[in-house]
Amino acid sequence: MEVIISHDAESASKKAARYIADVIKRKPNCVLGLATGSTPLALYKELIRMHKEENLDFSQVVTFNLDEYLGLPNNDPRSYHYFMHENLFSHINVKPENIHIPDGMTTDVLAFCEEYENKIKQAGGIDLQILGIGNDGHIGFNEPTSSFASRTRIKTLTHDTIESNARFFDNDENKVPRHVITMGIGTVMDSANVLLLAFGKSKANAISQTVEGPLSAFIPASVLQMHKHAKILIDEQAASLLKLKDYYRWVYDRKPEWNKWL
Ligand code: F6R
């Protein structure tokens, strides 16, 4: 696990975008795992800028999103389909047939989830998975106590997540769907590389437990301690509770040039 502390969310998002651009340049048909939420917004803006101003080419890129609310049609502004089209896909040249997002309106959840896993496998697996993190340590919608071996499936949201996401549903918790489809923790762990982003004070506790706490299904992101190529890219505030933050900075500042990815 590599911890990279950036001054603020903006500089971290630019670093993340450069990293992704580098992955795409090295492997134009790479498979990206994508997240929604507030955290990756600045990253997606920067990728759009790179596409428009620097010809970053997404024409062969394949994408798989982590999750979607059950019961929301694709054209609902609160669905993750809508979010992704609004904030990334409609501004870049990714091919519609290369975009995969769980279907919140599926009538056969079990078959859909199995098929989603198969499609990831058929695409050759995820080269780079982008993650945010919930205040309770969730990744995707894998809430606390999700199995580390879990695959794409239906999950019930915790009250904490419903409360936190009510901001996208007129601040009305009753409007937040209770169920979602999410890639499992095992699905995320199969990705060749993982980049988790976290910004702001509200994420500090989840980050300290993820990086320096015990491996525990109670903090789903702590599983990343077992991933071979996981990078945790955070701002000063999200890093504020880390005991070894000076060490992480020291390590990063002394990385050999050839090994410096951003
Ligand atoms: C969204 C997702 C979630 C979010 C997490 C943080 O696709 O997978 O795990 O990354 O809830 O959300 P924000 O970024 O809004 O704080």
Image (cartoon, rainbow, N blue to C red):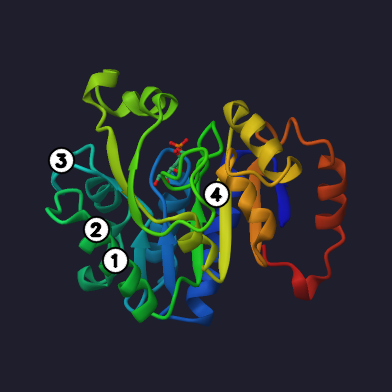
Which residue position is annotated with label 2?
110
Label 1 neighbourhood size at 10 Å, few (<14), some (14-19), many (20+)? Answer: few
Q: Is residue 217 left or right of residue 215?
A: left
Q: Which residue is mark 4?
A: 13
Relative to residue 213, is residue 56 depicted above or below?
below
Along the line of sight, which residue is nearer the eye, 86 or 167? 167
- Residue at 23% of width from left, 42% of height from top? 79
Number of the label disc, if any, that sits on residue 76: 3
Identify the residue under disc 1.
114
Dot in front, 4 or 1 = 1
Q: Mark 4 or mark 1: which comes first in sequence?
A: 4
Q: Label 2, secondary structure: give it.
A: helix
Mark 3 or 1 closer to N-term?
A: 3
Whether the residue carrying mark 2 lies under 8 Å from ligand 1 is answered with: no
Disc 4 from disc 3: Cα separation: 27 Å
C-alpha span from label 2 to label 3: 23 Å
Secondary structure at badge 1 equals helix
Q: Earlier in the sequence, mark 2 or mark 4?
A: 4
Where residue 53 is drawn, which disc sits there? Answer: none
Q: Nearer the viewer, mark 2 or mark 3?
A: 2
